Structure formats: structure tokens, C-alpha cells
Image: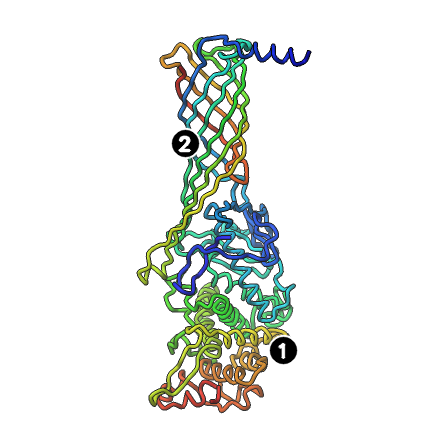
Amino acid sequence: MKLRALAFLLAALATPAHAAPRLSVELGGALFLRNDPQGSFWDEELALGARAAVGLDRAFALPEALRLDAGLLWYASSRVDGTDAVQVRRTLYSFALPIAAGWELDYRPFEALRLTPYLTAGPAVTRTSVTYRVADPFGRRQGLAPVETDAGAWDAGGLYGAGLAVRAPEAPLGLGGRLEVARLHRGPYADLAFALGLGASF
Amino acid sequence: MAVLQWDPASRVYELRVASIETLDDVAALQGEAAVAVGNARITVGQSRIRVTGSADVHAEFIEHDGVLYPSDFHSLGLATAYFNFERARAYALARGMEPETLRRVPFYYHPEMYLSDSGPDGETDNAAWFPALRSFLLFPFDAFQEIPLAMNQGVIAHEYGHGIFTAEVHGGVWPPPWLAGWCPDGACTEANGVRMLDVLEEGFADAWAVGVTRDPWFTHHSISALGDGRLVAGFVPSRHCHSQARFEAAIAEAADLPPADQERYWAAKKYEVGTGVAGALYRAGCVDFAVEQGACQARDRCVEGDWDRYDRVMETLLRAYRASENSLARLAETDPDGSEFGTFAAVARSIAAAAEDDALRLALCAAFSDRLAIPAADLGAACDDWNGDHGACDATEARGSGALCVHGGGIRE
């Protein structure tokens, strides 16, 4: 009996409610508050970001106001710290596959904007690349060149957070965007990200 | 773990893989050798010192080819500083320091200094042993753009040398009780003792730095503006030859200055005279003299890679701090006003008497006599069998005659 009910549910979900899912692309940025190795509460870091998402709500027979999408998220950040003689460049490339589920509000500012508060979560991986450049002044005086060393590693973790999606379906290109607050594992610690994105949906 | 290290082959700092043995919390950089403390504000008042905001550090590492690499500059600074403390401690333990001495000593990474009556002190570009907190302070860098002080093995070993001096000579107490006798109500009736204390602290600290690193040029990587001013290797009379008369002349010169200028004067002078003391220890540990082609030649065995005798000099120095019968600790404790402690001769007697083999003892007698112009009669029983000839500092003509080779090295062929 349970098996038949499950099959019925899957069949209902798999029945297309509309012809094509909505696709969206966004460019944006994020302010990461990352772990500060020196022990203060945080250290700020800016990142560039891009997101592509497919709206699943059109593909399944879901309540009209429910918004469900699956996306691919990318962030890149890089910073150099140190003295003239010792510099460390750390570059992070983060990729996440977040699912976002939200409920579109009846409240519509300017009558054209649709607001959807949402929750989001998904797996994430980060590539950390570090370049160490050492130019010992004692060596420079002897004509020795600076020495560079590279190291890199992948870290797997997750992303989870909440946001507010905005879209204007009547505007050209289906203008949309989002504000999001999320925790993203980019290393041994989860960084807090305040993200802003702007893009189009088709 | 990858940390910044001095490479003896290329003689420069570079990122190298090191085995760190004593860490029990890698991210917090805490272990037997030291405990990192971040984010601290240290407020120094008239009567007390307050530390606020201090927190564990959270260094980040990535694992690459089975090695932990610090993933940002401050993590590299913290990891390298810990490694440097571990090396400095290992050297001191091998010289005879008790394991409980300076065990898990805190080091404050980039603290903010405040003076309670005048606000932020803005201390940067410095590293210090702070005996009142029994801690090391590694200040932020600003104008210093070379190898950061926290990453310089020699700088950390120098500060560790101060820590050893406090632990041994002062019995781990700051201020030591006898200092109140030397300077009742903060006014020192006899300046020689307290100034000698400063000189010895800096000179011995440099001697520890050279022993740990095997790099007499250790300041050149981080403070190249100093030039050769603190270089103990080689022989430069103006840098390495000192005397009691010259020391006391400096004290008299400073006494004519306003109090604030006196402190500034000694802030520089203690390193200058201290280099003479460190240079004497280096001569005893590293320099041999031999007649070659009819002339007396000095040979630096340490520059050639043989540091064994220098290490034994440092073992002797450590014994002279407290363990030996005529130790510097005893000398300080029994000296009512610092006038005896404030003589090179008394210090030299303590150190020479702590030597455990005759060759080393005679080398110390000769080095102190030469570099600090101490008359043979003032060197005490430990140097009774030393012939009393001076060396290069006061008899440059003797260098050509071979007299230095026969006697000045203190080691009879």
C-alpha cells in the first residue's frame, strides 16, 4: 500500500505543470567575514560571485507560490598580505550546489516586484591556492632572486543560509536579484557571507 | 609543517618543511615550547599591568603532499614563531636548562600596547621579553618590511635568551628582590649594576641567538639598517673592544643628560656594549689562532661549521647564571648596591669559573681579558693559570709577532 502511494506521489511530482523550467543567471559579490587567525572575531574579505539556477517549481505540480530552484554557485577571492620581503597570496575558488526553497509573498512593491524569502543549503567545495614569496634582503644583496613556493588543496563542506530573492517578470530579460546571508565552508571554518546578486531569468 | 626557516647553505630565509614536535593544538599553536595568544590589549599602569581581549589564535592550514601549509600570512607568522620558540627551547634544553623553565610560555602575537595615562602606545616593529608578564610580545610590523621579527629565528632566540636570564639569574621573579636594594624608591645610587644588567641581557641574548641559529648575521634579515653593528663574528676593534673605563665613561656621560634622554642613550648603548660581551663569548667559542707563514692568523671554526666549542661556551654561560658556586645570581643577590655586579671583571670571573674543562676556561679568560680589557689579576682564581697576555684589542702589534697565537687564544698548543 505504501509503495503504491509513493509511486503515485512521484508520478504527480514528475508531471510537468508547465512546459519549461525557468533559468536564471546572476553576477554578484559577497563580503565574507572569515576566521581571523590572530584571534579577533573576524577578518573581512571581498569575493566575486556568479550563480546559475534552474527553477524546479515549474517542472513539478507544486503550489503556485512555492519557489524551488537548484543552482550552481561560484565565488572567487584573493588577497596578499605581508611585508615587502615575505608575502602570502591566498586565492579561494568556492563552488556550491545549493537548493533554495521559498514562498513568494503577496506583497509586491511597485506592483512589479515579486519578493521571495527563501532558505538555501547544499554541498560546497573550495580550492585554496597559496603562493609564498620570500625575498630575504640578505639574499637580495648577494644577488639572489626571490623564492616562490605554491601549495594548494581542496576542502569539501557545505553552504546554508537564508535570503530574499527579487524578480521583475515583466521587465526586459526578467530582471532579478537576491540578498543572501549564508555560512560557507571554505576551509576548516565556516565563513559568514553577505551576498548580493543581480541577473536575468528566462 | 611548512614554516619560514634560515637555510645555512644559501644563508637566506625561505619556506621549508620542518618537523614540529611539541605542539598539542596545531590551530591554536599551543604546546610545551610556547602558547600563542592573539588579539590582546596590554595596558601598562603605574602599579599594574592589565591584559584584556586576549584569545586563542586560529591558524589555518591546508594539507599539500602530506605537509601542513599555513594558508595565510598570519598563520605563517604564528606557525613560524612557534617553530622558532621550539628551536630556541630545544637548544637551551640541550645546554642544560631545566624542562620546567619557560615551559608553555605565552607569546602575544601582534598585541596592542596602551599606557594607562596616555592611551595607545602604538608599539610596532619590535619583539620583546616582558618579564612582568613572563611572556614574549611580538608586535605588529609597520616600517620594518623585511623578514618579520616573529619569523626571524635569531630574533626569537634572542628574546628567549632574555627569558632564560630572567628565569635563571632573577629566579623567575621580576623585579628581583635585590633590585630594590640597588635602586631604593626607584633611584639607583650606583648606576653600574643596573646598566651592566642591561648590557649583559642584550649581549647574552645575542649569544643565544647566534648559538641557536648558527647565523651571526641574524639581524641582517630583518633590520638591515643596523648594518654590522651587532655582528659578533669577525674582529672590528671599534665594535668588539670594550673596557670598564669606557663603560663607566658612558655612564658618566649619560648622567649629565635629562632623565628621558638617559634612557634613550642607554637604549642604544646597551646593545653596543652588549655586542662586545657577545663578541667575547664568540671569540672564546669560535676563534682559534695559529701561526701561518710567520704571521698570526685567526681562524673562525664556527664560520667553517664547527660549533661544538661555542655550544660548550653557552653551556658554561647557563651554569654561570645560577647553577655554579660563583653564579651571576649569587653575585647579584649578595651585592648590596650593584657596584660589584657592575664590573666586567666580576661577570668574567663568574663565567670562567663555571667552565668544566680547562681549555674552555682558558679560552674564556683570554677572550674576556682581551675584548673587555680585564687585567689578569682581576680575573680571579679561575684564570690563575692563564698567562695574562692580552690580545688583539690592546696590542695590535702582537698580532704580527705571534704573541697572540701563543697566548692570546688562551689555548696552549
Q: Chain of mark 1?
A: B
Horizontal and vertical percent position of residue B365 = 51, 84
Q: Residue at x 54, y 31 (%)?
A: A158
Q: Callout 2: helix, strand or loop?
A: strand
Horizontal and vertical percent position of residue B232 = 43, 72
Residue picked out by circle 2:
A48
What numbered label is drawn on residue B257?
A: none
Horizontal and vertical percent position of residue B203 = 49, 71
Q: Nearer the viewer, residue B70 or A29?
A: B70
Q: Nearer the viewer, residue B14 or A115?
A: B14
As shown in the figure, which amino acid type bears the numbered disc 2? Answer: Leu
Q: Chain of mark 2?
A: A
Q: Nearer the viewer, residue A33 or A76?
A: A76
- The mark closer to the camera, 1 or 2, is 2
Would residue B118 be seen by someone viewing this image from the given angle?
no
How many angstroms separate mark 1 from mark 2 (CA)? 65 Å
Residues indicated by labels 1 and 2 sit on the same polypeptide chain: no
- Left or right of B336: which side holds B111? left
Q: Residue at x 53, y 82 (%)?
A: B360
Judge whether A121 appears above or below B130 on screen.
above
Q: Nearer the viewer, residue B114 or B380?
A: B380
